[in-house]
Structures are given as C-alpha cells and as structure tokens.
Amino acid sequence: MDSVSSSSSLDDSTQLSPNSDPKDVEQRFDLLSVTDEPIQSEPSHRGNGDGFTNGSLNPERSTGDEDDDQLVEDQELVADEGPSSPNSCSYAGERGSASATSVSRIDAASDIDDIEIQGVRNESSFEGISDSQPSSGVPGKHRVDEDDASISWRKRKKHFFILSNSGKPIYSRYGDEHKLAGFSATLQAIISFMENGGDRVKLVKAGKHQVVFVVKGPIYLVCISCNEEPFESLKGQLELIYGQMILILTKSINRSFEKNPKFDMTHLLGGTDDVFSSLIHSFSWNPATFLHAYTCLPLAYATRQAAGAILQDVADSGVLFAILMCKHKVISLVGAQKASLHPDDILLLSNFVMSSESFRTSESFSPICLPRYNPLAFLHAYVHFLDVDTYLMLLTTSSDAFYHLKDCRIRIETVLLKSNILSEVQRSLLDGGIQVEDLHVAPLPRSGPSPHQVQQILQTDSPERPREPFVGIGGPAGLWHFIYRSIYLDQYVSTEFSAPLNNHQQQKRNWAIQNSVQKG
C-alpha cells in the first residue's frame, strides 16, 4: 500500500562507577530535571545490535546554523538562504576541523578477525579521502568554544552525542568533544545504571526535554531535544547517524573495543565533522530521512532511459552499483543482478559525497561501507563530479579496480555529453520541482468527488486534459503541499512549498507534522 502525507574525553586511568547516580546529569546539564515521568526501558533481552533499524546535506541551503541550532529563548526563526523546499520530485520507473586531512579507514582483509583500523592521510593519491575547507552550504562544526558549562550550550534546542561504552566522547554536535568528557561520562553512567538493573534505557523525559538513547554494542548514541519530535523520529535520526559512522568505519570497529575497552576512535573520524553536521542538518528539510525512500530528478522518459542504458552496460562489466545523481536526487540507479540498494544507503552515501570537498576537486576512489547492504565489509566507491551538481558513483568489491572504473566513467561521460543528458539535467534543476498549481485537476461536483472519481483523477495523465483555473490559495481542492511515497518503488514525490507555506517556520512545522504522521 502506498502512503500519502499532506497538510491543509576521559583519561585512560579514569574509572566509572557502574553504580553512579544518573541524577548527576542534572548537575552537568540543567536542562534536565527530575520529574514524575518514568524512565522508559525495556527488558535486557536485547540482540547484538547488528541491525541498522529503519529510521544529506542540503547543498541548496547555505547557513551557519540550521533550524535546530537556535537557542531556546530565540523565538524568531530566520529563513535560510536558497530555496525553501527540497525540490523533491520523482517518477515511477525508476570531523574535526574543516582543514583536517586525516580520515578513518579499515583495511579490508579476507578474514574479518584480522581487520585492523588505521588512520590514513591522503597525500594526493586517489585512495582515501581528505577534507579541505567545506563548500558553501556545508554546515561544519558548530560552536567549538562551547562546553557543558556554557549557558549557550545548555540552551541549544537539539544535541547529538556519540560516545563509547567507557564514556569516552566520540562526537558532539556542539562544542569540543574533549571538553565534554565529564558530560559523556554522565550519559554513560545512566546507561550503565539501567543495564546493571537488567534493563536498557531508551527514553528519559524531563520537562520539555527528551533524552533518547540508542545502544549499538560498544557505541552509545544520545539525542537531547526540546523540539517536541516524537521518540521514534529521534531514534530514527540516531540510527542514521550510526549508519553514517558505519559507512566510514564498518561495524568491524567493534572488534577494536573488544580488544581494548578504552579504545579511542576519535582520530578515525578526523575530518568528518562536516559529514555528520550535514546529515543532522538534513533532518530538518529532507523527507528521505524519515520516509526511508529516495526521490528522482524529474526528466523525460527517453532521457532517463538513455542514462540508465549506459549505466546498465557498465554494471554488466563488473560494477556492483552505478548511481548517477544530481545533488540529493537520483537520475538513474543500476545494480548488478540480485543486488539491491536500500534508500538509507543512498541517503548516507550522497550525504558523504556532497559534504566532502575533496570529492569535488578530483576523482576519488575510497573505501566505504553500506550499512544496509553489508555493515561488516568495505566496498570501494569511485566518485567523479561531471559538473557542479551532477556526480557519478561506481561501487565495486575490488580494491584494485580504480583504472577500470575510470575507463567506465569516461564511457559514461561521453554518452551523457553526446546525448545532451547533462544539459537536460541542468534544465530540470533550474525548472525546480512540482508546484501544486501545475497539477492536473478535473472539475469537481459541488458534493465533492467519489472515491471512484478520485481514483480516475489520479490515474489520468493526459496532457490534453484541460486544467481548472487556479481558485484561491491551495487550488480548487485547498491543497497546499503533499508528499506521496510508493512503498513498492521505495520512492517519494513531493511538491514545492508555495503560499501560505513559503515561510521557513511554517515549512519546518509542516515537516514535523508529516514526520509525526509517518511515525504514527
């Protein structure tokens, strides 16, 4: 069935007591206070955490602080630059500082037990990734001068943390992770306190704040939010953040913690703050983060078929996946026989590429992991930007396939240029997505349409059918905006925002409502 949503660091010598009182969190973060709200937990018969549960940088929006970065007392929301909607439309048928150059990588091995985790520095080679200054529109690390003693830090509306089971901070959305070692230890103490009692903490409510916990083996993820988002939504966002980390490191990182519980993995994520920040930013504008579906760039059928044909030819030559994208939208996607790509993997992969400047400056060949496809193994991704917005990703299981994939890219690019596909892509990008006023509408009787009439209207696609004149705000049916998700295709289509939803605050509220409906 299809669905529609519409709107009318701790030192190594530091020991943590498993019996630490979780109320210590109030002393470190006065957002939280003891209330009568119970702690939501579940019995300790949990699995091994191997699953990546269902839960992108928007290059079109350039801002220093995204929606959720505003302080609690700030009541005015300032619209971001650039388009105010995700321009989503599809057709069926288809860390560290910004100047850091180190990145994490796990060398693939035939025996998973022998995998070693290393930090790799990219020295003008095609293997690995280096992050230079982020491109415009890539939200980087926020407020590195803040810590848990800062009033401004405490008043942030939404925090995300990654820490190890020993309490070592790995990532924080705001502030310097090392300055937040004590706060991370407090979060770890809460989790340990519940686990020692035979339970697993999932949610703590304190006033307007929700503290959501997700435990993935030795990795703990925590979100503290006062945005009134549903628990399932926040949990899904933490799952995606974990998936983004697995895309960079694979789940084999767990073996390092098994060998050394005090293992420090922050250096493995050096230079990837932009990646996590852009993903978090996308939670406020990209429907793919809660729909678990992807959207396509609107193109003529013949154009998309031509693009798919050349990608299929390449896939038949040993490429696992060939993906042609324009920003966060899919142009064409082809996989090897019996190979399927989950929409969440597309989201995380495109976010990784779009938020890393090094991919834009040269062709790249980098190890990546697709958490939905196989969280324990590396694939290798050849990435090349064909123009400012359009890029090609070729994924393979072979670590020495760079030159073969380079030849494949040359063939693909030649066909795309000769057939003017790239020109059509740019034209579609400039045209934008669907507007409600552009939708085909049929005259409706005064009593309204019957279900049968509605079905006929939805199935009709004749360009000759006359359109009803635009009647006031929202058209004749009073529709302002909609999202349609096809479960069968794992795709969604969405209209652009228009009046009266052309205000940034209204759009944010609209996404929150649709997110809640989806989770419900």
Image (spheres, rainbow, N blue to C red):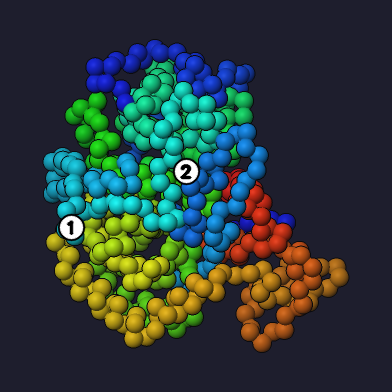
Quarter holding the N terminus is bottom right
- Residue 407 showing in the rendered view: yes
Residue contact between numbered discs 1 and 2, judged by CB atoms under 8 Å = no
> Residue 380: percent from the left, percent from the top?
23, 58
- In the rendered image, residue 27, in percent from the top left (x then y), is placed at 49, 16
* Mark toward the viewer: 1 or 2: 1
Q: Separation of disc 1 and disc 2 at Cα?
A: 34 Å
Side (left or right) of 503 relative to 174: right
| Coordinates of residue 450 in the picture (x, y in percent) | 77, 68
Q: Earlier in the sequence, mark 1 or mark 2?
A: 1
Up the image or down, 334 lies above or below 276; here it is: below
For mark 2, does the 10 Å Cα neighbourhood hold few (<14), some (14 to 19), or many (20 or more) residues? many
Residue 372 or residue 8, whichever sits in front: 8
Q: Residue at x 33, y 72 (%)?
A: 386
- Name the amino acid, label 2: Gln
Using the image, determine if residue 372 lies above or below residue 235: below
List x then y, in percent, for residue 66: 52, 47
Q: Secondary structure at mark 1?
A: loop
Residue 124, label in figure: 1
Quarter of the C terminus within the rendering: top right
